Structures are given as structure tokens and as C-alpha cells.
Amino acid sequence: MKSRQVLLAARPAGAPRASDFRLVDVELREPGPGEILVRNVYMSVDPYMRGRMNEKQTYAQAWQIGQPADGRAVGEVVKSQNPRFAVGAVVVSNMGWREHFVSAGEGVLPIDRGLAPLSAFLGVLGVPGFTGWYGLKEIGRPKAGETLVVSGAAGATGSLVVQIGKILGGRVVATAGTDDKCVWLTKELGADAAINYRKAGDLAAAVRQACPQGVDVYYENVGGAILDAVLAIVNPFARIALCGMISQYNLETPPAGPGNLRNMVGNRVLMQGFIISDHMNRYPEFLAEVGGWLKAGRITYQETVVEGLDRAVTAFLGLFAGDNTGKMIVKLGPEPAEASGR
Ligand code: NAP
């Protein structure tokens, strides 16, 4: 049986390009004893994958040139010689960037289809949502009435952070890169103010104006000028969760360090980075809480869905241009029928 997958073809300098990847046909073998064959239905493209294109090992394993890329995916078990997986089961895996895979089942987990549409397990109920929930609750620790600033707020992670901030009683100020995203953030997600950082002009002044009581919690997805603007007006005992710094992922030379760091001293500010894979033991707790909010209609989400493995690279590159509202998803094939009890 033929299938297709995406390989890393070259390591980028600066911004990644389509030519850094190659789509190839592969021959799939039949699953042997203890193995399953999975047809991927959705795959995730994520900003952290930019780091995996580099040679240098970071917290995530570097992709190798000539080898398939990988990442989160949701798929259907189509053949099984493993008693843990029934044919028709819907599973999440780390075997994205390919249409099918054969596996012994390590790292492949069944998902509860009744909880949400399948693609949600890559976004609001997947790693991005989990990251936002963990970083906000464990590092940000917002209290009712406090001011929370969220950058990258219209993305997969940020859009959940905004909504949890509101559920916890915060005053939420969001930043994003288009007016439409800002409208979604204020009108549908409940943000108290949203700043289009591309149009704001004097970003520090815009953040100051949107946060008349200063900033108690900052959820950082972006880095650069927004961090400087927040650090200029942090309140005593503010908490800053460093989730990501997408504005820097394509830079070859690190920028000069953030300004206004001195304010952290007198204000006793806590700033902490974190990597969500260190906290996977908390995933069931996240799924119960955020899955419950989703079912109850207390939170909502958007996805930008790109069709076909041949457009996966476009979707990935689009993350750095702000092409997505909510989670960027690649749809690889039809959803398995629900009528069959799957
Ligand atoms: P996302 O926010 O859904 O997508 C990326 C968004 O970043 C784009 O839509 C774009 O929105 C914004 N962006 C791109 N380039 C930018 C720039 N130069 N300046 C400002 N904004 C820019 O992606 P995500 O998966 O939810 O990830 C969000 C952040 O969380 C990333 O930094 C990621 O690395 C981090 N993350 C960390 C962990 C962890 O374990 N620590 C786990 C998951 C994700 P605009 O239109 O607003 O520019």
C-alpha cells in the first residue's frame, strides 16, 4: 500500500521555506503481530517545530535531514494486531506529517470522541490548550480582579488563556496581529481590551492605556516589544509565565535582552519558563476541567483548517505570518464514520 509523508530536506537559516521540506511517497508494510496501522485524519503544525528544524538539540528532539518530520496527529486504527486497539478506534499520536503509520502502539492513546470534535484534541483539548491551562494556573495564578495580559492571544494557546482568565475573574488584555482577531477576542472570548500590535504604533503606550491598574499577570507567547511594554508597568508580585517567544524563532542572532527588567527587582516579580511535556501527569485534570467548560458552553474555540498533506508546509509557514485564528490544523482525510460506533 502506498502512502505519503513529509521529510525535512534542509535546515533553514532564518525563516523556514517550503524547499526545506519534501513530500515523498512511501510503501507501507502490513502491521505485524502486536502492531497497528493508523490512517491520520488531522495533524498539527506548531511553532515549536521551527526549533526542531535546527541541528542543535533543544528540549524537543531535532528532526534529521532526509527523515520524516513528526508531531501530534489524530487518526483511525484501520488494521490491528494489537489487543489494546480495536479497528475503528480513534487515537492521538506523535506520528503526524504522514498519512498513515504502522506502530506497536507506544505513545498512541485512544481519545473520547464523545467529548469534542476530533480536531479539538490537537487544539483546545490538546497540547496547546493544556499548555495555556497549566501555564496560567500554575505560574500566572491570577486572582479575581487582577489584570492579565496575554500575547499571541488569538492563537491556539492564547485564546484559551484569555477565556480561562475571564472564568477566573481577571481583567484580560489581549494582543494579536489583525483587527479581526481583536474583534473575536473582545466580542466572543470576553477580553476587556485587545491591541493589534501591528497597528498600535507606540505599543508601550497602548499597553499602558489598556492596563490603567498595571499588570499582575503576563502570559507570554511572543516576546520582544510586548514583553518590554509589560515590564514597564508590572505591579508588585506580578507573575510572568514564559510559554513561548515566536517573534524570535526565525532570528539568527538573538535580540538585545528585554528592557525594563529592573522593574522586576523592586516589584518582586516572578518570571518562569516552562515546557508542557514536563507536566503530562496533569493532562487528565486539564481534560476534565476544560472539557467540562467546553461541554457547558463556557469556552469556545476556532480552528484554521488547511486541507491535504501537500499543504502541511504552507500551514506550518503560515504560523509565522499569523495566517491562523485559533489552532492551525491540517486535515489529511475524511473523518471515520460515527455510525459504526467508533
Ligand atoms: P498559535 O498562537 O496558534 O500560532 C502562532 C501565532 O503567533 C500566529 O497566529 C501569529 O498571530 C503569532 N505570531 C507569529 N509571528 C509573530 C511575531 N513575529 N510577533 C508576534 N506574534 C507572532 O500557536 P500556539 O501553538 O498556540 O503557540 C503559541 C506560543 O506558545 C508559541 O510561542 C509556542 O512556541 C508556545 N508554546 C509553548 C509550549 C510550552 O510547552 N512552553 C507549548 C505549546 C506552545 P498574530 O496574528 O497575532 O501575529
Image: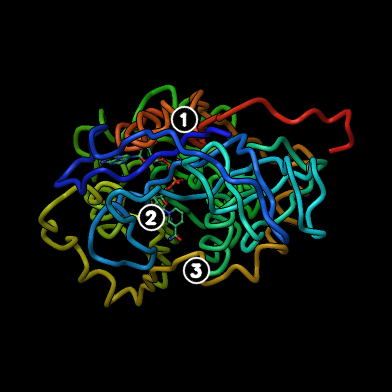
Task: Name the one closer to the observer, 70 or 227.
Answer: 70
Q: Colour scheme of this structure image?
A: rainbow
Could you say whether the residue bearing mark 1 is in a helix, strand or loop?
A: helix
Mark 2 and mark 3: span between their CA atoms?
A: 11 Å
For the image, the number of numbered tags is: 3
Category of crowding for the residue at label 3, using alpha-carbon neighbours closer than 10 angstroms: few (below 14), some (14–19), many (at least 20): many
Considering only order in the chain, which callout, 2 or 1, is on the residue closer to the N terminus? Answer: 2
The location of residue 293, given as percent across then percent down, is 74, 46
Identify the residue position indicated by label 1 in the image. Answer: 309
Mark 1 and mark 2: span between their CA atoms?
A: 31 Å
Could you say whether the residue bearing mark 2 is in a helix, strand or loop?
A: strand
Q: Residue at x 80, y 28 (%)?
A: 337
Q: Is residue 51 left or right of residue 26?
A: left
The amino acid type, in three-letter code, at marker 2 is Glu
Q: Residue at x 80, y 60 (%)?
A: 84
The amino acid type, in three-letter code, at marker 3 is Ile
Identify the residue position indicated by label 2 in the image. Answer: 220
Ligand 1's image quarter is top left
Identify the residue position indicated by label 3 in the image. Answer: 139
Could you say whether the residue bearing mark 3 is in a helix, strand or loop?
A: helix
Q: Nearer the viewer, mark 1 or mark 2?
A: 1
In this rendering, is residue 43 above or below 234?
A: above
The location of residue 80, given as percent across then percent down, is 76, 49
Considering only order in the chain, which callout, 3 or 2, is on the residue closer to the N terminus? Answer: 3
The location of residue 131, given as percent across then percent down, is 53, 57
Q: Residue at x 26, y 46 (%)?
A: 247
Is residue 71 something one can see in this rendering? yes
The amino acid type, in three-letter code, at marker 1 is Leu
Task: Name the one closer to the observer, 325 or 225.
Answer: 325
